Amino acid sequence: MSDKVVISVGGMTCAACVRRVENALKNVEGVVDAGVNLATARATVVHQPRWAGVPALARVVAEQGYEFLGEVSDAAADPIEASRVRELGELKLKVSCGAVLSVLIFFGSMQHWFGFLQAIPRQSMLAAMFILTAPAVFWVGSRFFIGAWKAAKQKTSDMNTLVAVGAFSAYAYSAAATFFPRFFGSAGVAPHVYYDGAAMIITLVLLGRLLEAVSRGKTSQAIKKLIGLAPKTARVIRDGAEVEMTIDALQTGDEVLVRPGEKVPVDGIILTGRSTLDESMLTGESLPVSREAGQKVFAATMNQAGSFTMRATGVGADTMLAHIIRMVEEAQGSKAPIQRLADKVASVFVPVVFLIAFLTFGVWYFVPADANFSRALINFVSVLVIACPCALGLATPTAVIVGTGLGAQSGILIKGGEALEKIHKLSMVVFDKTGTLTRGEPEVTDVVCAADFTGRQVLTVAAALEKTSEHPLAKAIVDRARKDGISPPSTDSFEALSGMGARGFVDGKAALAGNRFLMTKQGYSVDLLDGEAVRLAQKGKTLVYVAEGEKIMGLIALADAPKASARKAVESLKRRGLKVAMITGDNAGTAASVGAQLGVEQVMADVLPGGKADAIRQLQAFGEVVAMVGDGINDAPALAAADVGIAVGAGADVAIEAADITLVREDLNAVPEAIALSAATIRVIRQNLFWAFIYNVIGIPIAAGILYPFFGILLSPAYAAAAMAFSSVSVVSNSLRLKRVWAKRSRLRNEGDGI
């Protein structure tokens, strides 16, 4: 058995940083696995019950040269946020100073362009540029040199190494050319200086970091919005009086008053009163819903009309809002399988870049007839600077963050990058019937009696057996009995028979209530009821047989209407080329009737809970990539067995836990929406990875001077720095574009154009 902990790590800048931190965390005693997300600056560590603990994680993070910012235990108190604010402030200051210094140095480099500078002796100008460049390189760019030094101590290298070596090489060469020009003259090399290039490399790379940090902050806006939804205070009734107190002070069982226009402070059940609530922040649905005594309400939803009192059932970390935040954070911190390719490339990227850079220097210094040290150095520096792996490290996590955030805003909770990637590969969607495709609120429509029994007797025994069950059919039978004035007697030795029914002793007599399979298995003959059973089943009704002693008493027919969104969801899935099936423990006649109403052609009926999982595996064996959509405890094995498990949020906790995706809202159109969101996100990830790869495939050869023999083109280090910064920003911006694409799709959907 394993557990996990999430920590915040500061100072990571590229895919190489991610790899170093991951490897270090994996080597901690008792750690099973570790995954680091560059975009969220978080590491998820899976560990055994006996392990070295969080202090050991903090130690190895520090040893690698990064900042341990603490354990993430509460979304509202994320230590990375404070670190981000500090980082943004520092970046803005240093970018501003770097820009000013770069402009001054540029003026000095182009002294002959400006008449007012021509009177200054060239050697004096070079000395001034030497002085101005020092803070631009070593103070403005201090993070690169510190990062490179820490990497060197670990006998490794990263993006900081590339930038630090590149900028320092340009500065050191320029200093030598300034103060030892005769040495260059004796070697037959013109003593050119590249102070402006060194300063601009640092400034432009740092500008890229700043833009990247701002953009990454935008990708996590969904979480920030969710956290901001929670109210700060609540009105609690104590000793008959209203007392306003902070949310943190509320306890389970407190009686809370909610007035019109106020947010519901915690999860709970309405005791008195009724109202309409805006639950769009949870479900993504804009239409308000009515709530009355006995019904659940959730924290942060908006009370629109009417006052009510409620009993708190979930406070603090136990609210639905807190659960959603945790799920989204876990999803955003996870890795999609497609990221593995990028990780493999990043693991060898920096050493290969250094090799290419030194080869570039050697070729340009020794091969051309007009070879010189300056040109070789410039190309060496350009290769180092342009080859930044930042874009590669950001390609996947930024898209996953945006995708899962958009899902959360639409009432679709995606547990991780793996689920996000798998769902767009589906070939088939299998729905549970009761409570998923149907409303899950069946009503008794018919009571059929065998000889010597009355309808009242049948209902009495059935209600006695079903009164302790949470199954929708059981509740419907009990409700019908109460409406008929029947008070169910006590039941002894009660036993729930999963997927079949229930049995026990009612008034000292053995009694049984369940489906036809259960009755025949227990040796009861139902032939006398077959005529009525067939007639009712053909109408799409569910049948519950009731027996007492050795006799069949009769049967109860129940009808459960399909959800309003079910047929449209099925049609949307079919338009996407997906096969749609329904699986249920209900009889074949009822299942076929519901399937016909919804346009579901493949119907699997009379399937026990364990059989649902087997049915899913059988479909997979035939090559189908299967999603299972369910809500009940009996659906949990199938949800776990499916390639993608989708739980309806109003369902059982165990079903939600087993699923990869949770639909907070009841609208089944969220299923094709989730598939569309996955497809859009994966498309953006592939675009990002393509850009990151192609940027380096094209940029590095150009920086090495491959175009010079044909077109006379060499890439200045300053231009290389600008291109590198642009690549990172473009990847993040493309991920953010997903927001606009999804907003347009949602608008079209609301206008009736579908998914």
Image: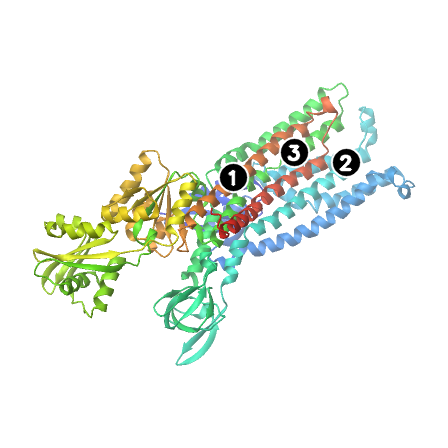
Disc 1 marks a residue whose amino acid type is Arg
Q: Residue 206 lies in what quarter of the image?
A: top right
What separation in Å lies between label 1 and label 3 (alpha carbons)?
Answer: 30 Å
At 55% from the left edge and 48% from the top edge, which residue is drawn? Answer: 744
* CA gap, disc 3 and disc 2: 15 Å
Q: According to the image, label 3 marks what residue?
A: 384
Q: Which residue in the protein does label 1 denote?
A: 683
Q: Residues within 10 Å of mark 2 (few under 14, many from 20)?
A: many
- Mark linked to residue 194: 2
x and y, in percent, of residue 148 in the image: 62, 40
Q: Which residue occupies 25% across, 49% down?
A: 590
Amino acid type, residue under disc 3 in the picture: Leu
Give the left or right position of residue 690, taking residue 2 as reference. Answer: right
Residue 64 seen anywhere in this rendered image of the structure: yes
Foreground tag (2 vs 1): 1
Please say if the residues under marks 2 and 1 sit with CB atoms less than 8 Å apart: no
Q: Residue 715 appears at what percent x and percent y?
A: 71, 31
Taking the spot 69% from the left edge, 33% from the top edge, the residue there is: 381
Q: Is residue 471 visible?
A: no
Q: Which residue is at the front of the view, 658 or 287?
A: 287
- Mark nearer the viewer, 1 or 3: 1
Q: Who is closer to the viewer here, 266 or 3?
A: 266
User: Judging from the image, what secondary structure is the residue with disc 1 in?
Assistant: helix
> Label 2 vs label 1: CA separation?
42 Å
Q: Secondary structure at mark 3?
A: helix
Give percent across and percent down for residue 336.
47, 41
Which of the pair 655/189 is nearer the observer? 655
